Amino acid sequence: MSGACAGFRNLSRRGVLQVGSLSALGLGLSDLLRVRAAQAAAGKRPASQADSVLMIWLSGGPSHLDLWDMKPEAPAEIRGEFKPIQTNVPGIRVSELLPQTAKRAHQFAMLHGITHNRGEHEGAHVWMLTGYKPVRPFFALRDPSQDQPSMGSVVVQELGPKNSVPPYVCIPVASYNGAFNAFLSRRNAPFEVNGDPNKDDFQVRDLGRLAAMDDERLGRRRRMLGQVDGSFRHLDAVAESLAAKDEFYAKAYDLVGAAGARGAFEIQKEPKELRDRYGRNVLGQSALLARRLIEHGARFVTLDTTYWGMYWDTHDANFKTLRETHAPNLDMAYSALLEDMERRGLLERTLVLVMSEFGRTPKINAQAGQ
């Protein structure tokens, strides 16, 4: 975790562990409050308070033993092929596959004491993204009466939107389990980008307008809709339904009509050099788009590149996959994100999380996987 949580270094390790249990690669919302209270009691200046979250979700379960929790003294069948390197913080080491990340260790904290007992991806997704142990079979139909809302939905419910930019956004799409709003209102559901920001023709589905649809014409259509709806408001049942729809129509018009909201998604406006620094791949460009959304006012942005071929479930060819694609892409994107957000002053108010549903078992199998 990084960003606004950097101030937690003011607490001792024992102090943090006494504050509350750790979850994911960050602290639970109630734990954050307790940490701030502990700092105040100790007479120390509290960390900057975050008002937005950017979460990089590594779906599939990356091998933590080959990235940030290496065991170089373990037997060969556990320690793997990669060696640890020293970061810019004494005593903290990461994999040799993460050289750029190693230079920014002063901006993040690694939490190793996290565990749960779900071995299947679906249930583990739900547990890590909501904070609640799933109560239904992992392949059962979703039931809002049993599901718990995701972290993003809770943040939006508690803090609300900042402006016309969707407060909760998933890039490119929502994680297939755990990103839902459950029993909370649909206003707390994630807005899905549904596109690969690395493509030259990238655009957000349903966000654009027809070329002939200028502001004046869009306004006329909106007024006409209001007149038609008004004709039925004398009927109680219809009025109640229309009142519920009005909020969604208003948000839709704001999103399509507001240049600021549309502009948040226009990654093409970023300089070529910066886009190259993030990495010309789906993870790198998703991270850059996430930064734009945070900068324009989104509360909670999740990026999960599973559906675009970056899945971390390495039952076989673990070392080849990490060496050739996954680790270099993550190293470039994450280090560029921290660097870029620091330069823009966004880390002062943004909690950046890198997390997944679980890690991997230690023994290397016959297929060079785990």
Image (cartoon, rainbow, N blue to C red):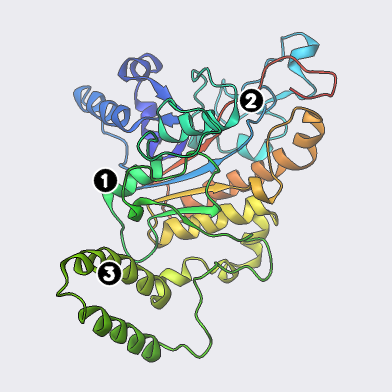
In the rendered image, the residue lying farthest to the right is 366
| Left or right position of 167 against 226 | right
* Residue position marked by numbered label 1 in the rendering: 158
Q: Amino acid at mark 3?
A: Asp
Looking at the image, is mark 1 or mark 3 earlier in the sequence? 1
Tell me the SS state at disc 1.
helix
User: Residue 89: image x %, image y %?
Assistant: 55, 28
Q: Which numbered mark, 3 or 2, is in the foreground of this view?
A: 3
Q: Which numbered mark, 1 or 2, is in the foreground of this view?
A: 1
User: Residue 106: image x %, image y %?
Assistant: 50, 34
Tell me the SS state at disc 2.
helix
**Alpha carbon separation for disc pair 1 and 2:** 33 Å
Say few, some or many: other residues with alpha carbon within 10 Å of mark 2 (under 14 / 14 to 19 / 20 or more). some
Residue 71, above or below 150: above
Q: Which residue is found at the position 38% from the left and 42% from the top? A: 182
- The answer to whether residue 287 shows anywhere in this view is yes
* Residue position marked by numbered label 3 in the rendering: 246
* Residue position marked by numbered label 2 in the rendering: 64
Q: Amino acid at mark 2?
A: His
